[in-house]
Amino acid sequence: MKSAVETLSPTRAKLTVEVPFEELKPSLDAAYKQIAGQINIPGFRRGKVPPMVIDRQVGRGAVLDQAINDAVPKMYVEALQANDLQPLAQPDIEVTKFADHESLEFVAEVDIRPEITLPDYDGLEAQVDDAPVSDADVEEQVAALRERFGTLQDVERAAADGDFVVIDLKATKDGEVVEGAEVTGMSYQVGRGGMLEGLDEALAGMAAGDSTTFTSQLVGGDLVGEDVEVEVTVSQVQEQELPELDDDFAQLASEFDTVDELMDDVRERLGRGKRLEQAAAARDAVLEALLDKVEVPLPETLVTDELNARRQNIEQQLAYAGMTMDTYLDNEGQTLEEFEADLERRVRDAVAAQFVLDEIAKKEQYGVDQAELSEHLVRRAQQSGQDPQSFANHMFEHNHIPEMVQEILRGKALAAVVESATVTDASGNTVELANLRPDGTIGEPESEAEEAEAAAEADQPAGAESDEESDEG
């Protein structure tokens, strides 16, 4: 077999493959054997029909077609390996020349992994915003905690923003009740949003026993996006009473004895969360700094597929949240054109980052052991809300394990780049990343921890035994 490569672009190649007829013999033999097992010819047992009889009864052309269909994918893979090409998608293959007892020639066009010249990625510099914990942040968290322990009391007045109401809802289209769009006795907080557009405006000023009708659009079902008439009836208006913020509340809502201890703990937890958010921003900033230093040609088909996948995912998330795209864009202060441009930019950056991190992982010769793969599968299962064993079985059965391994390798590459980078906040302070723990606390560097342990052991008096050793004695 001979093959030649023509570079159509940095991300697309054309393979021309020529296969001598004698190299097709294994595929021809397999085709004859398979056809012999499928036909009934008087005088011959099934599976024992000679090739010359198959040629006469079925046709030599059918055998050749089956042999080519079997041989071409194998020859294509061999040609990829011979020319050190890494495909990114399924190829477009065309048989350009073939006749019985003559060589087979076919061409294959395929998107390939681009060649990347890695820049110096050690010691990158990046900046992120400050991550202060303000008094307002603490007060907001404590207020949310008080709401969890609040009680609802019926009130004889019209509903206002923040009140809870018990309502019945019924949507109709052309006078007919929409199936699945009728609920009774539902508790809802006025002003919360995220249910039906126009509901909060309709509820404002309604008292127990009042009904009204407004026009809205359903976010699910067969009539999604269509105008419907929604009748809402209020049966109760309830005001939330919050507990006093005192030591009794601290003991009720936490393990602390005083409200000051509770407030300090809230501030500490917020600080850890802000630190993790800042670390995530730092990773993004370092990755952006890395991408700014390298040119990465992108296969447009890969970008388009990823764009379509992300659009579909966003649409599903909005549907689950009971929100239309128009409402989402209004909340984000974006036009559809701005949203699409931002989405495409993020997709292109993500695809480019994958290529660059793959190259770094390859250069650094990172590997993945079984424990790392198992941990990654469990984490991915938890993120998707699935049983870890079922998730792992699905990944193995559908041959997704190579993708999981690649994700781990990219994570290792990014972690190494980030840990070697210098990241500062807007105030000029260095952002600690290397020793940041998953809970947001800062640990000691491993070398320092080992030195401290060694020093502690050195301080132990000569001849002293551990408790365990003493017990054994």
Image (cartoon, grey):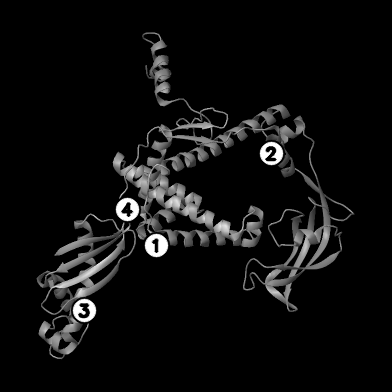
Q: Amino acid at mark 1?
A: Thr
Compare residues 356 and 447 and report the one nearer the observer. Answer: 356
Element assignment for label 3: helix
Label 4 crowding class (10 Å Cα cut-off): few <14, some 14-19, many 20+?
many
Residue identifier under label 2: 141
Q: Amino acid at mark 2?
A: Gln
Tell me where residue 201 sits by quadrant.
bottom right
Residue contact at pointers 3 and 2, CB within 8 angstroms: no
Answer with mark 4 or mark 2, whichever residue precedes in sequence: 4
Image coordinates for residue 11, horizontal then vertical, percent: 33, 57
* 319 versus 268 height, above or below: below
Answer with mark 1 or mark 4, whichever residue precedes in sequence: 4
Relative side of 233 to 360, left or right: right
Q: Nearer the viewer, mark 3 or mark 2?
A: 3
Q: Residue farthest to the right?
A: 156
Residue identifier under label 4: 114
Label 2 crowding class (10 Å Cα cut-off): few <14, some 14-19, many 20+?
some
Residue identifier under label 1: 301
- Cα distance in 3D space between marks 3 and 2: 70 Å
